[in-house]
Image: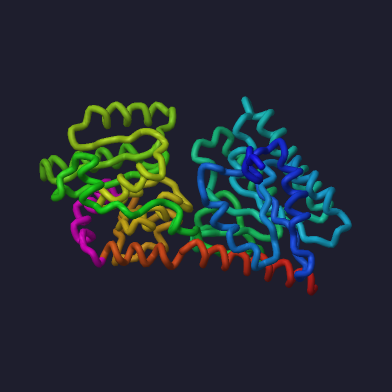
Amino acid sequence: MLITRQFGADKVVAHDDALRALLERDWTRERGGLLAYFPVNVGNPFQALLYSGLDAANLTPVPTHDPQTTKQVALALEGSGLDLVVHLHWLNVVLAKAKDEAEAREASKRYLGQLDDLRERGARLLWTVHNILPHEAHFTDLEVELRKGVVERVERIHVMSERTQELVAPWFDLPDDKLMPVPHPSYLGVYPTWMPRAQARQQLGISPDTIVFLLVGRVKPYKGITELLDAFDTLSEREPGRYELLVAGPPGHEDETKAFKERLLAHPTAHGALRKLSDQELQVFCKAADVAVFPYRRSLNSGALSLALTFGLPVIVRDDGGEGARIESSYGILYGGEDPDGLVAALADARRLLTPEARASAAEAAERHAPARVSGAFAAAVRHWLDSERAL
């Protein structure tokens, strides 16, 4: 038999895939069901990692891509006695295509109405808070209203940072009794990590003695790209030839990003691979670096930070984001985001992280959030929620 597509990858046949998943279930086990989720991010293994332990909860994850397809699945399950958990992810897609405020308001109303339809058909709603608000929000007030509406409708809210309630509080509230805390998984076992540091540096033409900083992931203004390059220049002027900066990831189309790209391309000791990297290329940059830097202006959860720790990279992180609470001094440096000299001082202090012990500590942090552990905790939390609600 010729395999022409991957399960769940094609939105057009997502409903058929969900029904196929039902047919393949082990009906001799305890009561279970499906976990339908949308939107689907095929370029990031986060969802696959989070759901990899769901069999322990007797739930089958099914990518349904959008509310309409999910409603079809809910209709198919009506009266079956099976659980249907609907897991909402990134809400920025709801208003992303709106050309004006009227369109945005209508899109928000339509989305919340679709959630109401799903609830009426027995779906149990769960939302993961990935970001405080979209990084490029055009209708901030409506984005806030949307999140308030989602909070009202969902039964559980998955938070990955212990600071989530605090950081979203200026815009919307998360009730204590709805919270489901499970951390972001690391990417252990996902990407190749075999390449020695010396070989990675040889491929990039970097001296063995140079201190190398890394910014990895999408290159966007909210990540503090201008502040990073300014701080790197200040540090390099103090000690010429001592430092290099690697920027690895696809750039956005913002004016600030274009200006950053122009500076980067003309820079003697800052280098960019401004594209989506293959898994093989990714390990070259992560293995060549000494310290990963995250000067994000506003951040709640960072997959790029989890990626850096996966490669045993010590990190520099602003202290006012969601990730700051879990960074340990054994492998990380926290700096004040409002301090104009904070990032420069943090980069200069990075020398203390250039030790095998710091790298081992970063790797241990990734191991604590290994996919098997996190997915197991997520499955247990979902099963406890469903069973406790049923017992009432």
If the image is split into quadrants, where does the N terminus sit? top right
Spot occupied by residue 355 in the image (x, y as percentages of width and height): 21, 62
For the image shown, how many numbered marks are present on the structure?
0
Spot occupied by residue 147 in the image (x, y as percentages of width and height): 64, 47
Q: Is 109 part of what is drawn in magenta?
A: no
389 vs 252, left or right, is right
Magenta range is: 338-357
Q: Is the magenta stretch mostly helix, strand or loop?
A: helix
Residue at the spot x=76%, y=71% of the render? 30
279 vs 233, left or right, is right
Q: Which of 351/208 is in front?
A: 208
Measured along the vertical axis of the image, is residue 137 above or below residue 343? above
Q: Farthest right residue?
A: 79
Q: Is residue 221 visible?
A: no
Residue at the spot x=35%, y=56% of the render? 311
Measured along the vertical axis of the image, is residue 141 above or below residue 210? above
Q: Which of 328/5 is in front?
A: 5
Residue 378 in which image quadrant: bottom right
Residue at the spot x=39%, y=39% of the render? 277
Residue 78 in which image quadrant: bottom right
Measured along the vertical axis of the image, is residue 151 above or below residue 384? above
Q: Is residue 279 visible?
A: yes
If the image is split into quadrants, where does the C terminus sit? bottom right
211 vs 187, left or right, is left
Q: Is 341 part of what is drawn in magenta?
A: yes
Q: Farthest front residue?
A: 1
Residue at the spot x=43%, y=68% of the render? 368
Residue 245 in which image quadrant: top left
